[in-house]
Amino acid sequence: MTDTGGTAPERTARVVLVDDHRMFRTGVRAEIGRTEVTGIDVVGEADDVESAVQVVAATRPDVVLLDVHLPGGGGVEVLRRSAPLMGDQGGVRFLALSVSDAAEDVIGVIRGGARGYVTKTITGSDLVGAIFRISDGDAVFSPRLAGFVLDAFAATDTPPVDEDLDRLTQREREVLRLIARGYAYKEIAKQLFISVKTVESHVSAVLRKLQLSNRHELTRWATARRLV
Amino acid sequence: MAAPGSETQYPEPDAPAAPGAAAEHPAGGPADPPYRRLYRSPHGRILGGVAHGLAVHLGLPVRWVRLAFVLLFFAQGIGALLYAAFWFVVPIGIGEPAPGAATQWAYVNGAFVRVGVGTARPAGPTKGRSRGIARLRELLQGTFLGAPDPAGPGGAPAPGEAAGTGRTGGAGQLVALLALVVGVIAVLNALHIQTAKPYVWPLLTIGVGVALVWRQADDSRWQRWFGLDEGSKRRSAFVRVAAGVLLVVVGIVAFLVLQGSGSTLASVVEASLAVLAGMLVLVGPYALRMWQDLGAERTARIRAQERAEIAAHVHDSVLHTLTLIQRRAEDPKEVLRLARAQERELRLWLYRPDAVAEAAPDTLAEHVRAVVAEVEDRHGVPVELVCVGDCPMDERIAAQMQAAREAMVNAAKYGGGGPVQVYAEVEGRTVSVFVRDHGPGFDPDTVPEDRMGVRESIVGRMRRHGGTARVRPAAGGGTEVELEMERADD
């Protein structure tokens, strides 16, 4: 998705892993946890909602890698209970990881406050890139998530409740389409003749709409996971 | 009626469409089950399917059984009593073949559809009499709303479906019912059974009312099993039950009036109402609790069945794949292929709503999925698919799918073994498919002549069908094929 920034890390991020599969946590730790190479410092792990909330509160990491399906209420519950810790400035940020393809899972965690969604098939270097992107306050969209968003915001006859939140701009649509086609942010910038920064701000704008819009498709998906 | 012995087969409904049915009713395929339980047959029944069920159970032609009932009916009405008793006691069953039914039901897309009424018989001039009987039979079946709705949910009525039977709800049926009653009375008169006897009319009315209500009870069970569209049928069900209750009440009142207690009718009604209210107050809580318990039990049973089904569907194939992977551990490509195929199957099963797949099996999204699966399996390269929107297939889009397949094969072969990204989108009338790899890339203008794949099967094919294809290096490396096609007019 992004470049990892060379061999010697010029920056670091403190990360907590939340996943109920120990093998997966071990694998991720092995891939990204070598701080001297990747700049990622894994400061805590948790395997259910209860312990996740505690670990996140105790360590205050930059980024939490959050599994969507967790015993005790799922990733959504962790997001709900950690909401006070999520601030715009220096707050804890969440990146959802899942094997799930279900729209309500994906849309559900995003509406719950996660700033990105990637599948567990993501490569180590891409994951490192995604973590730094999230810790910078940007959003990370997998191709599948982009597809869901395009679907959810597809042109319908229903008049928008809130013009600003319920519609995607032409530019945002183009960016999402390129993400769905498998383009990285840098490639999108090149394709549309804009800067990577602009691409990031478009994606962040889409994320905001996704979290705040009351479009009925979104609400439907959200209520499927019992959160609105 | 068709000739006795012309066997018809009812395809077994698959489990998901019939929650709760499979557990109670063993599959009765063409092979004889070891013992034959007595069920009432829902197929081609006129009233309650008793005669049919008995015929199947005893291995007799259904006509004989019906005839026996009719004859017994004239023996002091024993036939009617017997029939009612059977109806009351014997459970309605499914899956057993019906002997010599003119009405055939095919199981299509989760609903039974009537086939072959009026088409089963050879075309051409049929004897007026036999057609008359068939018509009467259909009328009867329609009156009591015979077997399930001939048109599947949302479907059109099957060919040969007589207008006004089974689908019109209340009015037509009531007319037919009245005609039936008059007919029965006429027959009784003709046979010199004294209709003058004062109690015949009320009793008949009560009987018909009870039959209606029982029939409705059968049908609602039937509907529950087959998950037919209940919303659309609720009204007609209500009309039928109401009509049945009304008939029974009218019959009882008439009975009372004839008995001579008509003068005190008001006080009798008052007293009965009081008794009824008292009963309701006493029994109500228990009935309610029972009803709720039943509901809970049903839910639990459906859940258990769902679990069993998951186990059957998924666990088996997953275990199988895992075993294969262990045995082929030294062949990484094969292991990758196996794992990927299994993952795809499991995902499809978990995340695609069945309803979608069943309602529209022939859409773009389904086809793209199939093509992706095939390419993944054949070339061992993961293909990631994202679909936005959907539309029905037509020839142009089929051509586009062919081109897309070719593009995916190319990407899998020459894309450096990395994952291939496919994005399909329907926007208004335009269908676009993008196939992207992260390989070394190539310049389409310098394609050697022997690589006809791109030139002919992708670009040429799209052009012939009125679409466009562009092959270009993707920003940031790799190649992207873009296929665009306008949908044909529906």
Image (cartoon, rainbow, N blue to C red):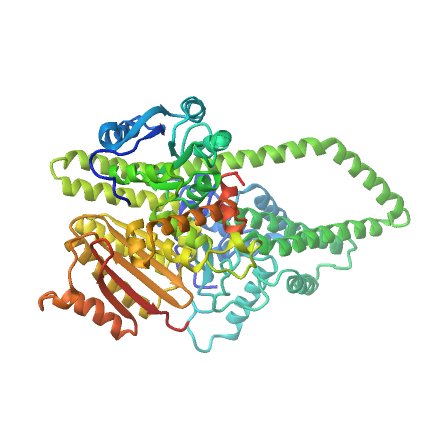
Residue A103 visible in this rendered orientation of the protein: yes
Please report the residue visible at 61 percent of the width from the left and 60 percent of the height from the top. Answer: B143
**Residue B311 drawn at (x, y percent):** 35, 36
Please report the residue visible at 55 percent of the width from the left and 63 percent of the height from the top. Answer: B137
Q: How many marks?
A: 0
Rendered view: B429 above or below A224: below
Considering the image in quadrants, where does the N terminus of chain A appear? top left
Q: Residue furthest bottom?
A: B125
Rendered view: B488 above or below B413: below
Quadrant of the rendered structure where residue A101 is? top left
Quadrant of the rendered structure where residue A52 is? top left
**Residue A50 drawn at (x, y percent):** 45, 23
**Residue A65 drawn at (x, y percent):** 36, 33
Q: Is residue B389 left or right of residue A9?
A: right
Residue B70 visible in this rendered orientation of the protein: no
Q: Is residue B247 left or right of residue B309?
A: right
Q: Residue furthest front?
A: A10
Considering the image in quadrants, where does the C terminus of chain A appear? top right
**Residue A140 drawn at (x, y percent):** 36, 43
Quadrant of the rendered structure where residue B287 is? top right
Which one is in front, B66 or A201? A201
Which one is in front, B199 or B412? B412
